Amino acid sequence: MAMLHTINKSPFERNSLDACLRLAKPGSAVLLIEDGIYAATKGTAVSDKVTKAMEGIKFFVLGPDVKARGISDDHMLEGVQVVDYGGFVDLVAEHDNVQSWL
Amino acid sequence: MSTKKFLYVNRKAPYGTIYALESLEVVLIGAAFEQDVSLAFVDDGVYEIAKGQSTDGIGMKNFSPTYNALGDYDVRKMYVEKESLEARGLTVDDLMPLVYEDEEEDYAEKPSIHVVTSAELADIMEAQDVVLSF
């Protein structure tokens, strides 16, 4: 059963990313939204952790939230797929259930 | 009225919460009282002044251009903590080039942003009369 996890908090301010990565099973997907998108940026204190988690979990990021925050393409971590709002809906539909890490 | 040293400490990313916008509003109001104002950008607060913000897709007002106006309100000291930038994979080049015009040097544009270490910022904080946190 594949689950979609959404994270909307900055990984530098809350432990939502850590909690999600601790409990998400391989084969599930993580969609980073709102302030959660900072977890998908390069060269940060958490980027190694995210890169490692990508071995078993697919990572997505909501494009409009990335653009709003001024994060350019070359700051994005490799392997993270950018989706729009339609893609968000598709991810929800494709997975069996959704857990929001607030 | 005597002048006091005011420091606004910004520690939140923009858009996810209202803190960043509220801070900016309070800074603009405070600027009208001609106090000695400084801003500090610490932790996720450094994201407030990231360049290239474009909020068309999220239905919120992009308030980042307003930081450019602060120089005209004599808000010229913006301290960005080096350690916070580094933890986020950012450099000063990823921030908006905020400037002010120095009337004593024929209105030459000078940078408002100063990247400082934690130790330097601690000294700046200690020298204030009033510290407001956002």
Image (cartoon, coloured by chain):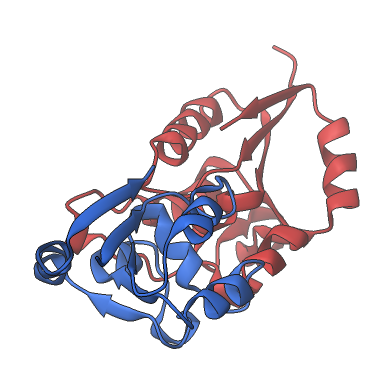
B54 to B58, vertically: above or below: below
Counting from the top left corner in percent of width and height, residue A6 is at 32, 56
Give the side of residue B96 with respect to residue B8, left or right. left
At 53% from the left and 57% from the top, the residue drawn is A22
Q: Is residue B89 visible?
A: no
Judging depth in this view, the residue of A17 and B101 nearest the camera is: A17
Q: The red chain is which one?
A: B
B95 to A36, vertically: above or below: below
B9 to A12, vertically: above or below: above
Judging depth in this view, the residue of B58 and A40 nearest the camera is: A40
Query: How many marks on residues?
Result: 0
Judging depth in this view, the residue of B74 and A57 nearest the camera is: A57
Counting from the top left corner in percent of width and height, residue B120 is at 88, 50
At 25% from the left and 60% from the top, the residue drawn is B55
At 69% from the left and 11% from the top, the residue drawn is B1
Residue A63 position by quadrant = bottom left
At 51% from the left and 27% from the top, the residue drawn is B32
Q: Residue furthest front?
A: A1
Give the side of residue A41 with respect to residue B93, left or right. left
Counting from the top left corner in percent of width and height, residue A12 is at 59, 53
Q: Is residue A82 visible?
A: yes
Quadrant location, the C terminus of chain A? top left
Counting from the top left corner in percent of width and height, residue B112 is at 65, 58
Residue B126 position by quadrant = top right
Give the side of residue A4 with respect to residue B21, left or right. left
Quadrant location, the N terminus of chain A? bottom left
Q: The blue chain is which one?
A: A
